[in-house]
Image (spheres, rainbow, N blue to C red):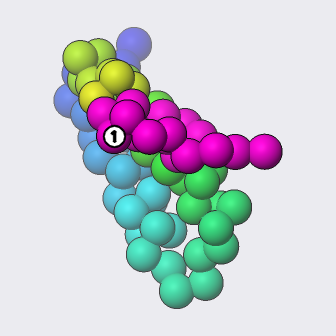
Amino acid sequence: MVTPDEERAAQIKALHGLLDRLCSPDLTLEEAKVLRNQLFDLLERINPLFSEASTPDRHGNDPSAGNPKKTG
């Protein structure tokens, strides 16, 4: 069984990995999109109150802006 401290340590390690990759000079746009989604997923696991309603959605639309990007 994983203790809360072990779970928190694993989450912090995952965040460090995502941030290291996001800061990489050879990051592509496609990889950045995947990493953004992984970051949102991790933040939602860390804090269930963190919701997509308060952040841009996974397709780059910002619901608070009232003017979503057109995709496709």
Residue 11 seen by the camera: no
Horizontally, residue 35 falls left or right of residue 16, namely right
Residue at image location 50% in from the left, 79% down from the top: 24
Instruction: Specify the farthest residue to the right.
Output: 72
Which quadrant of the rendered structure holds the N terminus? top left
Query: Which residue corresponds to mark 1?
Result: 65
Relative side of 14 to 26, left or right: left
30 sits left or right of 16 in the view: right
Quadrant hosting residue 54:
top left
Name the quadrant of the C terminus: top right
Label 1 neighbour load within 10 Å: few <14, some 14-19, many 20+? few
Q: Is residue 24 above or below residue 40?
A: below
What x and y, as percent, mark residue 11? 34, 39
What residue do we see at 44% from left, 40% from top? Answer: 67
The magenta segment is 55-72
Q: Which of the two residues, 57 or 34, is positioned nearer the viewer here?
A: 57
Secondary structure type for disc 1: loop
Q: Which kind of residue does numbered mark 1 sit on?
A: Ala
Q: Main secondary structure of the magenta part?
A: loop
Does residue 2 appear in this view? yes
